[in-house]
C-alpha cells in the first residue's frame, strides 16, 4: 500500500485522480493521488426490514434517537388484549439495524405512544394515553444502557381522557413540551411543560392552545426562533388545518394566535422542523383531496406562523404519515402507507426552498401492508429509521432508509491546498499550492477575509460541514493557503 507523502510548504506534485480544474480546493487520497473537492448524487434506497417484535404492534409506533448512547429507541403497544407498552433499543450498522430485548414501560394499555429525547437530561421521555387508567395522559422517563433501557415511575400529566399526546424538546429552555387533546374538557387542545430530573418528570400548569375540538396534534421545535409549533386539526364550525406558535418560560408555555393553513379535512400526523431551511413542515392526509399525501411549509415570525401553498407528495390515498429531518441530506424524509399501492410502506425526500417544498420519486421500503409508523434520524450513522406494523408478516418491523442526497469526498483532514498550473487531466501529474503558499488563480475574493472549503468544491466565507479552513485572501485573486 502506498503511503501519503509528507507535505512541505510551497507546492506538491502528485498524480491526479480525476480531472483537476485550475484554482480549486484539492484533497489527498489514501493512495497518494489528489482529487478536486466535489459532490456526487446518492439515490434513495432502503435496507431489508428487521423484526423488532415477532407479534403485531398496534396504534402508533414511535421512535427517537438517543444521542448520548448513540441508539434508536422504539416504543409501541403490543397487539394483545390490553397489550402492554414495550420499548426496544436499536443499533444501526450500515443499512441494517439490530435490537436488544424488549422492555415493558407500562403494564397498562398505551395508545398514541410518542418518544422524545431530552438532550439536557440525556434521557428519553415516552408519553401516551393510558387506556387502562381512564385514558389518562401519562409520561415515563427511560435511560438507555448498552442495548437495553430501564424506566422510572410513570407520571400522570393530565387526569382525564387524553388523546394524541405528542412531545418535542425545547433545547433553549431545556424542557419537554407535551401537546394533547383533553377529552375531559370539551376535546380542546392543551399543552404542558415537563422537566426531567433523574428518572422522573414533573409538569407545569396546562395551557389551552385551541378551545375548538382538536384532533391529531403534532409538535416540533424551531431552534432558530426558539419556539414550539403545534400542527393540528380543528373543528370549530367547520374543519381546518391549523398551527400555533408557543413560547416556553420556566415551566409554562404561552401561545400566539392560531393560523389556518387548510380549509378542509386533514389528518395531520407529522410536524417537523427543517434546520437547514429554518422552516416548519406539516405533512398530512388531505381528506378534502381524495386523501392525497400533502405537505405545507410554514415560516415562524415572532409568535405567529405563515404558510406557502400545499404540495402533494403522493397523489393517492396516504395514511400513517410520519416525517423527520435528515441533517445529512438537508431534507425532510416522509414515510407513509401508500393506499394506492396495496398499502406498501413508502418514503420520499422533500427539499424546502423558501416557503415551498419539492419531493423526489417515492421508494418502497416494505412490500407488505404497512401502518402505525414512527420515524427518527440517526445522526451518527446519517440514516433514517422507520418502525412500522407489517400486517402481511404479522410482525413489528424497522427499516434503515437512505434518502436522496449528495455526498462529498471532503473530510476534516484531507484538504491539502489549491490546484494550480491550469486544468490537469485524470492520471497526469498535478501541482498543488499547499501549506503557507500563495494561490494566485482566484477571483472575487475580499482581502483580509478568511475562506472555507465548501463541499461542492468552491470556497466561501462561512464554514461548511465538515468545517475546513481554506486560507486568507490578501487580494481579489490571491489566497494564502492554510490547512
Image (cartoon, grey):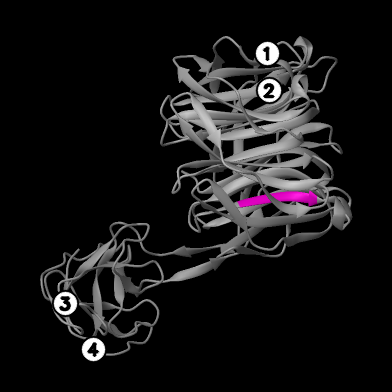
Based on the picture, tell me whether residue 329 belongs to the magenta stretch: no
Q: Is 475 situated above or below 63?
A: below
Pointers 2 and 1 in contact (C-beta within 8 Å): yes
In three-dimensional space, the C-alpha distance between marks 3 and 2, rounded to whole angstroms, equals 58 Å
Left/right of residue 204 with respect to residue 343 in the rendered view:
left
In what element is the residue under mark 1? strand
Marks 3/4: CA–CA distance: 23 Å
> Is the residue under label 2 in contact with that under label 4 (CB below 8 Å)?
no
Q: Which residue is mark 2?
A: 128
Q: Are marks 1 and 3 in contact (CB under 8 Å)?
A: no
Q: Which one is earlier in the sequence, the residue at label 3 or at label 4?
A: 4
Percent x, y for residue 380? 46, 43
* First in sequence: mark 2 vs mark 1: 1
Query: Quadrant where the C terminus lies?
Result: bottom left
Q: Which secondary structure dominates the residues rendered in magenta?
A: strand
The residue singled out by tag 4 in the image is 421
- The residue where tag 1 is placed is 106
- Which residues fall within the magenta stretch? 281-285
Q: Which residue is mark 3?
A: 447
Circle nearer the N terminus (3, 2) = 2
Q: Nearer the viewer, mark 4 or mark 2?
A: 2
* Magenta region includes residue 284: yes
Instruction: Please report whichever mark, 4 or 1, sits nearer to the chain's N-terminal start.
Output: 1
How crowded pointer 2 is (Cα within 10 Å; few <14, some 14-19, many 20+) is rated as many
Q: Residue 8: image x %, image y %?
A: 11, 69
* Label 4 to label 1: alpha-carbon separation: 68 Å
First reached walking from the N terminus: tag 1 or tag 3: 1
- In the rendered image, is residue 320 in sight? no
Identity of the residue furthest to the bottom in this view: 422
Residue 397 drawn at (x, y percent): 72, 36
Amino acid at each position: 500500500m502506498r503511503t501519503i507523502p509528507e507535505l512541505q510548504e510551497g507546492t506538491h506534485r502528485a498524480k491526479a485522480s480525476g480531472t483537476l480544474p485550475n484554482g480549486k480546493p484539492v484533497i489527498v487520497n489514501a493512495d497518494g493521488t489528489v482529487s478536486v473537492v466535489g459532490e456526487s448524487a446518492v439515490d434513495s434506497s432502503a435496507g431489508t426490514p428487521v423484526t423488532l417484535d415477532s407479534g403485531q404492534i398496534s396504534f402508533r409506533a414511535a421512535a427517537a434517537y438517543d444521542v448520548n448512547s448513540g441508539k434508536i429507541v422504539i416504543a409501541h403497544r403490543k397487539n394483545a388484549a390490553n397489550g402492554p407498552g414495550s420499548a426496544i433499543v436499536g443499533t444501526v450498522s450500515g443499512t441494517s439495524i439490530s435490537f436488544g430485548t424488549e422492555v415493558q414501560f407500562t403494564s397498562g394499555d398505551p395508545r398514541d405512544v410518542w418518544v422524545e429525547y431530552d438532550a439536557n437530561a440525556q434521557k428519553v421521555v415516552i408519553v401516551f394515553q393510558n387506556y387502562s387508567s381512564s385514558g389518562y395522559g401519562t409520561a415515563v422517563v427511560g435511560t438507555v444502557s448498552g442495548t437495553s433501557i430501564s424506566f422510572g415511575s410513570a407520571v400522570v400529566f393530565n387526569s382525564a381522557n387524553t388523546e394524541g399526546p405528542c412531545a418535542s424538546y425545547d433545547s433553549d429552555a431545556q424542557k419537554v413540551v407535551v401537546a394533547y387533546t383533553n377529552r375531559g374538557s370539551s376535546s380542546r387542545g392543551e399543552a404542558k411543560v415537563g422537566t426531567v430530573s433523574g428518572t422522573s418528570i414533573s409538569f407545569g400548569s396546562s395551557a389551552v392552545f385551541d378551545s375548538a375540538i382538536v384532533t391529531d396534534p403534532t409538535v416540533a421545535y424551531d431552534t432558530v426562533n426558539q419556539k414550539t409549533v403545534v400542527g393540528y386539526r380543528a373543528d370549530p364550525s367547520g374543519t381546518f388545518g391549523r398551527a400555533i406558535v408557543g413560547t416556553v418560560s420556566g415551566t409554562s408555555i404561552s401561545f400566539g394566535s392560531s393560523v389556518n393553513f387548510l380549509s378542509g379535512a386533514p389528518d395531520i400526523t407529522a410536524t417537523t422542523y427543517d434546520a437547514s431551511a429554518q422552516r416548519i413542515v406539516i405533512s398530512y392526509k388531505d381528506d378534502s383531496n381524495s386523501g392525497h399525501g400533502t405537505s405545507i411549509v410554514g415560516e415562524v415570525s415572532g409568535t405567529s406562523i405563515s404558510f406557502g401553498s400545499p404540495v402533494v407528495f403522493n397523489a393517492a390515498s396516504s395514511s400513517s404519515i410520519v416525517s423527520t429531518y435528515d441533517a445529512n441530506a438537508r431534507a425532510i424524509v416522509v414515510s407513509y402507507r401508500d393506499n394506492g399501492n396495496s398499502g406498501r410502506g413508502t418514503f420520499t425526500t422533500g427539499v424546502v426552498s423558501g416557503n415551498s417544498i419539492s419531493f423526489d420519486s417515492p421508494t418502497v421500503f416494505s412490500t407488505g401492508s404497512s401502518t402505525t409508523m414512527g420515524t427518527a434520524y440517526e445522526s451518527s450513522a446519517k440514516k433514517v429509521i422507520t418502525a412500522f406494523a407489517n400486517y402481511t408478516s404479522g410482525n413489528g418491523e424497522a427499516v434503515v432508509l437512505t434518502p436522496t442526497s449528495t455526498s462529498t469526498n471532503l473530510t476534516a483532514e484531507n484538504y491539502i491546498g489549491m490546484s494550480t498550473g491550469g486544468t490537469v487531466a485524470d492520471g497526469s501529474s498535478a501541482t498543488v499550492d499547499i501549506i503557507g503558499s500563495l494561490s494566485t488563480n482566484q477571483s472575487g475574493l475580499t482581502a483580509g477575509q478568511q475562506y472555507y472549503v465548501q463541499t461542492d468544491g468552491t470556497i466561501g466565507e462561512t464554514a461548511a460541514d465538515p468545517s475546513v479552513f481554506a486560507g486568507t485572501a490578501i487580494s481579489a485573486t490571491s489566497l494564502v493557503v492554510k490547512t
